[in-house]
Image: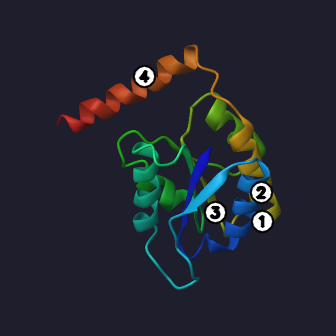
């Protein structure tokens, strides 16, 4: 799989761990920035990764900012994105198995590199379970379509 990654200055501290986890899972990463610790705006990177996932240029995405919250909010504004802000192993697993999250967001100021590595590995090795969960994903898509029509 190809995994798109993106971050702002607050998430850049996790990039090495995230890239290592992606490689250790046998996948390829595509880095959409940022590339320095200079202050930048997280929505710019959220939309780059989200657009890549929606366009099929990447299979999944990983986003990082200071808390993971702002970048996940921005990503979720892109139609077709289900970005989950994750802080623990159970959430990393469930966001794929139950919510079919196509992007996971983590925070560089609240998550250490070792934990980020573990979360990414769990996220990438978990599989959507479908069934009753697909019904819920379909309802989310219906809300998205309704809002687009307003």
Residue 97, located in which quarter of the rendered image?
Answer: top right
Of all residues shown, which one is farthest toward the right?
114
In the image, what residue occupies the spot 42% across and 60% down? Answer: 48
Instruction: Tell me the CA gap for discs 2 and 3.
Output: 12 Å
Q: Secondary structure at mark 4?
A: helix
* Labels 4 and 1: the sequence-earlier one: 1
Proximity of marks 2 and 1: CB atoms separated by less than 8 Å: yes
Q: Tell me the tag on residue 148.
A: none
In the image, what residue occupies the spot 17% across and 37% down? Answer: 150
Asked if residue 110 is positioned above or below residue 49 in the image, the reply reads: below
Instruction: Tell me the CA gap for discs 3 and 4.
Output: 28 Å
Asked if residue 143 is positioned above or below residue 122 in the image, the reply reads: above
Q: Nearer the viewer, mark 3 or mark 4?
A: 4
* Labels 3 and 4: the sequence-earlier one: 3
Q: Measuring from the top left, give residue 91's x and y in whole percent.
A: 69, 41
In the image, what residue occupies the spot 62% across and 57% down? Answer: 29
Q: Which residue is mark 4?
A: 138
Proximity of marks 3 and 4: CB atoms separated by less than 8 Å: no
Between 36 and 105, the one nearer to me in the picture: 36
* Quadrant location, the N terminus: top right
Q: Measuring from the top left, give residue 53's x and y in whole percent.
A: 46, 47
Q: Secondary structure at mark 3?
A: strand
Instruction: Tell me the CA gap for discs 2 and 1.
Output: 6 Å
Q: Which residue is mark 2?
A: 117
Q: Tell me the tag on residue 107.
A: 3
Q: Measuring from the top left, give residue 40's x and y in whole percent.
A: 46, 78
Instruction: Tell me the CA gap for discs 2 and 4.
Output: 31 Å
Q: Which residue is mark 1?
A: 113
Q: Secondary structure at mark 2?
A: helix
* Labels 1 and 3: the sequence-earlier one: 3
* Labels 2 and 4: the sequence-earlier one: 2
Instruction: Tell me the CA gap for discs 1 and 3.
Output: 10 Å
């Amino acid at each position: 799989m190809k995994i798109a990654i993106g971050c702002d200055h607050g998430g850049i501290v996790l990039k090495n761990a995230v890239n290592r986890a992606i490689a250790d899972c046998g996948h390829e990463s595509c880095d959409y920035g940022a590339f320095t610790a200079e202050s930048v705006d997280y929505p710019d990177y959220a939309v780059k990764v989200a657009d890549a996932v929606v366009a099929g240029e990447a299979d999944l995405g990983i986003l990082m900012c200071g808390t993971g919250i702002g970048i996940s909010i921005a990503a979720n504004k892109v139609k077709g994105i289900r970005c989950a802000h994750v802080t623990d192993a159970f959430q990393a697993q469930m966001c794929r198995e139950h919510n079919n999250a196509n992007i996971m967001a983590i925070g560089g100021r609240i998550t250490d590199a070792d934990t980020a590595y573990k979360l990414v590995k769990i996220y990438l090795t978990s599989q959507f379970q479908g069934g009753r969960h697909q019904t819920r994903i379909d309802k989310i898509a219906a809300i998205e379509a309704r809002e687009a029509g307003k």
